[in-house]
Amino acid sequence: MQTVFNYVEEKMGKTVANLLSEYTGIRAGRASAGVLDHLSVEYYGVPTPINQLANVSTPEPRLLIVQPYDKTLLKEIAKAIMVSDLGINPQNDGTVIRLVFPPLTEERRKEIGKNIYKYAEEAKVAIRSIRRDGIDKIKAMKKNSEITEDDQKNAEKKLQDLTDKYCKEIDGHAVRKEKEIMEF
């Protein structure tokens, strides 16, 4: 039965980590190298993340500088940034790409806020699905007479407590990210 709890807790932890990864890609009005994490460029026929092809630095709060290790990739990286949904125009000066992050409008902040809670809700749905899988495994153990009915009830309660804990953690992350978005 402990293996079920370990499995459930590991999966729920990965779900929260995935949510946090999604949140790093959300532009908050300030420069963050995380916004480029989801962008790839063809490099020798293989889609390669930009952060593996270039040095990404933040010299100022609203400026991101992308300096490719291979200067021939400048145009490809600029093109990938332009066609992405970042809404930022890359400035290519022949040696580096500058990304200037404009301040977010109130309308755009509200739109991003909705996305933050949409991602949080998707993560909570995933957490509940993991709980359901755990409960199914516990019921199978009861059916196979590996555990008693009392053990089943206690295990289901423990799974519910884990679910509540992770859902509360997700809500906390969503509130913090929304506060970050609304600050600027």
Image (spheres, rainbow, N blue to C red):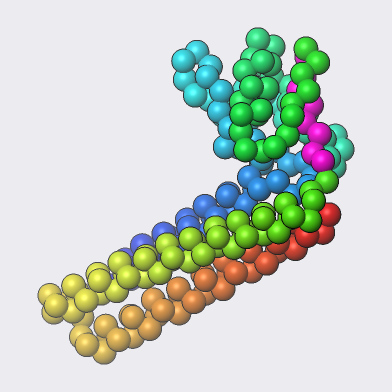
Quarter of the image for residue 59 reads top right
Q: How many marks?
A: 0
Q: Quadrant of residue 9?
A: bottom left
Residue 93: percent from the left, percent from the top?
81, 15
> Is 96 included in the stretch rendered in magenta?
yes
Residue in the image at 56% along x and 23% along y: 41
Position in image of residue 91 (x %, y %)? 78, 23
Instruction: Name the residue: 38% across, 83% down.
Output: 157
Q: Is residue 158 left or right of residue 108?
A: left
Question: As drawn, which residue projects farthest toward the bottom?
Answer: 150
- From the top left corner, tell me how far across and down residue 39 is, in percent: 58, 32
Q: Is 143 on the left-hand or right-hand side of 41?
A: left
User: Of all residues shown, which one is farthest toward the front?
Assistant: 107
* 78 horizontally vs 5: left or right: right
Q: In this picture, is 14 found above or below 29?
A: below
For the magenta stretch, what is the residue range?
95-102
| Image vertical order of residue 107 relative to residue 131, above or below | above
Residue lying furthest right in this view?
Answer: 60
Query: In front: 60, or 118?
Result: 118
Residue at 77% x, 31% y is 99
Q: For the C terminus, which image quadrant?
A: bottom right
Q: Quadrant of residue 148?
A: bottom left
- The residue depicted at 48 percent of the width and 66 percent of the height is 124
In this view, the residue in front, 4 or 56, is 56
Residue 111 counted in the magenta span:
no
User: Where 182 sits versus 165, above or below?
Assistant: above
As drawn, which residue projects farthest toward the top?
A: 72
Q: Is residue 91 visible?
A: yes
Q: Quadrant of the N terminus?
A: bottom left
Residue 182 lies, in percent from the top left, at 78, 60
- Res 70 visible: no
